Image: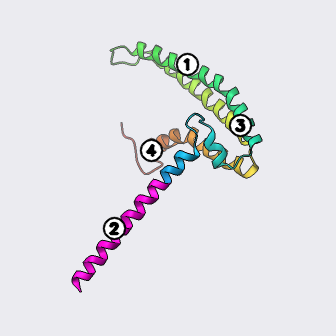
Amino acid sequence: MNRSLVILLGALALATAIFAGSYFIAQRTTIMCCTDARDDLSWLKTEFHLSDAEMARVRQLHAGYLPKCAEICAKIAAKKQEFKTLLGTGTNLTAEAKAKLNEIAALRAQCQAQMLQHFAAVSQVMPPDQGRRYLAEMRKLTLGNHEQMEQSMSGAMGHEHHP
């Protein structure tokens, strides 16, 4: 009886391993087949069930937004380099360095505002339910990291930051 139980449990473990392996391979294959590596927007059509016309409009909006995004990213990178230069090897934060941080923060806020406007425009060319879902997800991605950090530092998540 004991030997039968061991064989049964071994067969069950083997079947579970085969099933799990097959599942993960099938999932990975599906992802690879359903997305186009040359097209960073292809996932939108599948995820939000967009028609060809809706997808064409999304692509048009995306193409119009990319130069604005690149411009603000370049400005942020330049200000960050200026800030790094101002910091030098010193240990104190100078008034000039603080001012540069404020400039970087203003550019990041401008970037977030432009992103949110872009996401709102994209959501409006989608079917209403899908557009709301897309906009909610993009807002979470755009603002979420900052909010999580703010909550953790403010004690809102049960963690207090102590100097």
* Location of residue 153 with respect to 114 vertically, above or below: below
Marks 3 and 1: in contact by CB < 8 Å? Answer: no
Inspect the image, locate mark 3, and give the three-letter code of the amino acid beneath it.
Val
- What range of the chain is rendered magenta? 1-26
Q: Residue at x 33, y 18 (%)?
A: 91
The Cα atoms of the two marked residues, 1 and 3, are separated by 24 Å
Mark 1 or mark 4: which is in front? 1
Kind of residue sitting beneath label 1: Ala
The mark closer to the camera, 3 or 4, is: 3
Residue at point 36%, 18% (across, down): 92
The vertical placement of 69 against 29, above or below, is: above
Q: Would residue 109 appear left or right of 5 to someone viewing this image? A: right
Give the residue at mark 2: 14
Callout 3 environment at 10 Å: few (<14), some (14 to 19), or many (20+)?
A: many
Callout 2 touching callout 1 (CB < 8 Å): no
Mark number, residue 152: 4
Task: Determine the main secondary structure of the stretch shown in magenta.
Answer: helix
Residue pointed to by mark 1: 74
Q: Nearer the viewer, mark 2 or mark 4?
A: 2
Counting from the top left corner in percent of width and height, residue 48 is at: 67, 48
Q: Nearer the viewer, residue 153 or 111?
A: 111
Tell us which disc is closer to us: 2 or 1: 2
Asked if residue 18 shows in the view, the reply is yes
Q: Name the secondary structure under disc 4.
A: helix
Q: Is residue 8 magenta?
A: yes
Nearer-the-camera pick, 44 or 73: 44
To which residue does mark 3 refer? Answer: 58
Residue 151 located within the stretch drawn in magenta: no
Secondary structure at numbered mark 1: helix
Q: Amino acid at mark 2?
A: Leu
User: Is residue 124 in view from this perspective?
Assistant: no
